[in-house]
Image: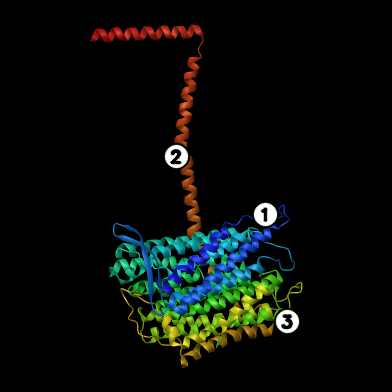
């Protein structure tokens, strides 16, 4: 086993060990033990140490892997062989895996450190507000380990294990704050909606494994699958991708997941869950490239999701829901890039998005921590009292909107460039109309994103305070330092797109194994300074200018009022949640009620009816047995006479 493969094996193991040990920590009852030691605080400190150490260890290993990995590497061992169908345990490493692992571990470490302050104190006091911190920190470690397992896994079934553990951890973490009535419902919704997609994901993996005779990713990629089998498998995989990455029509769980703690929102939106779907498609991209029907479907769904998320974000009052809908939209850019044949552009935007979206959620958490509300209508004027948070948020929103030279500008321009090439030149594995659809949706998304990003900045930090607040101020160190450090990659990471070695690392290795060496040519830089960047910049200025002009006219008014009758439609995300409720939830509940009624009245009725019949027969016989003595004697004699008569008649006949 080489150094690189050893690092790859340890990468998910370190946070996994931290999480498992954290789950074994004793419960933290409020109060003191007999020695006067605060049991709760001791358990909390142990959980903090384990959580931070696990994430920091994963980050060190990921950086070391990125530095030492000089080509595709793989290590494996056969776990079980069922009639020639092999399941292996091992890792499959390339530049994509190393870069994504660094992003996951960095965001996880920022979230662990940030949570120390965010879940300890209330907005205006020094009272501990969360005595369930140990399982919380342990679940974050397990969440991180599951995503890293997806990143480095060399076997589809092992990838599926990490995929499913992420779903379980998301349920537990979204429902962490049991004082909020909406949290359990949001967690259940996230769990069920993603499980719907995961059924398709499981079936797709099963089809590929049976077809290739192995679940090892290199074997699956190298096998010559039948066209129908490959198309069916890729479409089934897209169901899981739509669920995990919150793509239409399985996107409805993500905005509701904002009921969870803000650090968890940052983790889910920036580095885990939603990124897993995009990464899985990039990991298996040669299969999708050979199944253009699946990529066409992905392009349509990505374009719809891009616009749906962008328009829904324009009318939200909750600052976290604005950012949640922006995630839905930005994932649409990534899936659109995959659809037009550029996994490198999709992964580049995934990395920059991880930086600026984690920054935005943690900065929003600092605002919520200071003012005690998530509603922008109750904010305003925070720039003077929270300057550090203001400038960090400005950097994050600029990267989100695509302001040059921030990171999001270069990665988003890379997506638009490949979509433009697919539309105008017919480049890519899908028909040119898919390129047109992704390109035009992406251009509209630029203007709309600039509009709602400007609105968020104006409503939150500028103007006058709309509701008196109790002396808001910048967050303490444990909340401030993760935000400051994340502002750096959010600002400058996009410049890496000019470097050909960086682009080379983002090229998925279709057959990255010793048996099947990759024959990819050296990659060109992901971004270029061409005249085509003028159009996105013009649309950016248009969207931001419209929001600014509306706000300047009346700083007290919400720029979203300009949407008129469309505002409630956008706020409800085109009421697709209601449609889903009417077409899926209600019929399923009605079917469940009918099945329950049938079970209670037919199955249980038959069982209980037979019992009642036996009891009634027994009661009737008991009445006969309780007859008076003269009648009983007469009955016995009559019976004896009848038996004797029957014996005589039968004997005589014989």
Q: Secondary structure at mark 3?
A: loop
Q: Which mark is residue 603?
A: 2
Q: Which residue is mark 1?
A: 29
How crowded is the residue under tag 3: few (<14 C-alpha within 10 Å), some, or many (20+)? few
Q: N-terminal of the two: label 2 or label 3?
A: 3
Q: How far separated are the C-alphas under marks 2 and 3?
A: 69 Å
Q: Nearer the viewer, residue 468 or 334?
A: 334
Residue 198 to residue 514: above or below: above
Residue 603 placement, left or right of 255: left
Picture coordinates of residue 496 (x, y %)?
Answer: 49, 85
Q: Nearer the viewer, mark 2 or mark 3?
A: 3
Q: Nearer the viewer, residue 315 or 200?
A: 200
Q: Secondary structure at mark 2?
A: helix
Q: Residue at x 67, y 58 (%)?
A: 40
Picture coordinates of residue 159 (x, y %)?
Answer: 42, 65
Quarter placement of the N terminus: bottom left
How crowded is the residue under tag 1: few (<14 C-alpha within 10 Å), some, or many (20+)? some
Residue 386 placement, left or right of 274: right
Q: Secondary structure at mark 1?
A: loop
Q: Which mark is residue 384?
A: 3
Q: Are marks 1 and 2 in contact (CB under 8 Å)?
A: no
Q: How far separated are the C-alphas under marks 1 and 3?
A: 41 Å
Q: Are marks 1 and 3 in contact (CB under 8 Å)?
A: no
Q: N-terminal of the two: label 1 or label 2?
A: 1
Q: Nearer the viewer, mark 1 or mark 3?
A: 1
How crowded is the residue under tag 2: few (<14 C-alpha within 10 Å), some, or many (20+)? few
Residue 72 placement, left or right of 258: left
């Amino acid at each position: 086993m080489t150094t690189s493969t050893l690092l790859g094996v340890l990468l998910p193991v370190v946070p996994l060990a931290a999480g498992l040990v954290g789950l074994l920590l004793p419960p933290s009852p409020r109060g003191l033990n007999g020695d006067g030691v605060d049991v709760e605080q001791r358990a909390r400190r142990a959980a903090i140490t384990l959580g931070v150490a696990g994430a920091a260890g994963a980050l060190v290993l990921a950086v070391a892997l990125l530095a030492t990995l000089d080509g595709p590497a793989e290590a494996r061992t056969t776990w079980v062989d069922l009639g020639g169908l092999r399941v292996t345990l091992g890792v499959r490493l390339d530049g994509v895996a190393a870069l994504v692992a660094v992003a996951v571990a960095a965001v996880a470490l920022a979230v662990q450190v940030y949570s120390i302050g965010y879940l300890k104190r209330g907005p205006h006091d020094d009272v501990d507000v969360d005595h369930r911190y140990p399982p919380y920190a342990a679940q974050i470690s397990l969440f991180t380990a599951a995503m890293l397992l997806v990143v480095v896994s060399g076997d589809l079934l092992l990838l599926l294990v990490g995929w499913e553990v992420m779903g379980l951890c998301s349920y537990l973490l979204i429902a962490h704050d049991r004082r909020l009535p909406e949290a359990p419902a949001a967690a259940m919704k996230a769990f069920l909606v993603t499980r719907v997609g995961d059924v398709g994901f499981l079936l797709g993996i099963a089809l590929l494994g049976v077809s290739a005779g192995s679940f090892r990713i290199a074997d699956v990629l190298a096998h010559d699958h039948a066209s129908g089998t490959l198309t069916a498998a890729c479409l089934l995989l897209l169901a899981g991708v739509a669920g995990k990455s919150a793509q239409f029509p399985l996107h409805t769980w993500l905005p509701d997941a904002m009921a969870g703690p803000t650090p968890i929102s940052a983790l889910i939106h920036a580095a885990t869950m939603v990124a897993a779907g995009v990464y899985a498609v990039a990991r298996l991209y040669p299969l999708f490239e050979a199944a253009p029907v699946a990529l066409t479907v992905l392009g349509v769904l990505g374009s719809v999701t891009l616009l749906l998320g962008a328009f829904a974000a324009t009318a939200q009052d909750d600052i976290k829901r604005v950012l949640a809908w922006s995630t839905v939209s930005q994932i649409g850019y990534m899936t659109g890039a995959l659809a037009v044949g550029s996994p490198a552009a999709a992964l580049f935007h995934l990395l920059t998005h991880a930086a600026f979206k984690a920054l935005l959620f943690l900065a929003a958490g600092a605002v919520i921590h200071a003012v005690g509300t998530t509603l922008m209508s109750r904010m305003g004027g925070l720039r003077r009292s929270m300057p550090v948070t203001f400038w960090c948020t400005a950097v994050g929103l600029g990267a989100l909107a695509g302001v040059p030279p921030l990171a999001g500008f270069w990665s988003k321009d890379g997506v638009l460039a490949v979509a433009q090439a697919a539309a105008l030149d017919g480049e890519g594995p899908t028909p040119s109309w898919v390129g047109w659809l992704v390109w035009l949706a992406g251009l509209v998304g630029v203007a709309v994103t600039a509009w709602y990003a400007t609105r968020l900045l104006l409503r939150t930090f500028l103007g006058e305070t709309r509701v008196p607040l109790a002396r808001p101020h910048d967050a303490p160190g444990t909340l401030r330092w993760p935000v400051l450090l994340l502002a750096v990659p959010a600002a400058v990471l996009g410049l890496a797109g000019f470097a050909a070695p960086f682009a080379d690392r983002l090229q998925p290795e279709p057959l990255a194994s010793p048996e099947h060496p990759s024959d990819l040519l050296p990659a060109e830089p992901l971004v270029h300074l061409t005249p085509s960047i003028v159009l996105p910049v013009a649309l950016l200025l248009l969207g931001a200018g419209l929001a600014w002009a509306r706000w300047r006219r009346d700083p007290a008014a919400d720029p979203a009022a300009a949407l008129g009758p469309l505002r409630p439609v956008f706020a409800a995300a085109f009421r697709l949640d209601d449609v889903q409720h009417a077409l899926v939830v209600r019929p399923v509940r009605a079917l469940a009620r009918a099945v329950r009624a049938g079970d209670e009245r037919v199955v249980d009725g038959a069982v209980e009816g037979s019992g009642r019949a036996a009891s009634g027969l027994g009661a009737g016989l008991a009445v006969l047995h309780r007859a008076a003595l003269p009648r009983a004697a007469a009955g016995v004699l009559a019976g004896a006479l009848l038996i004797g008569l029957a014996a005589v008649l039968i004997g005589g006949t014989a």
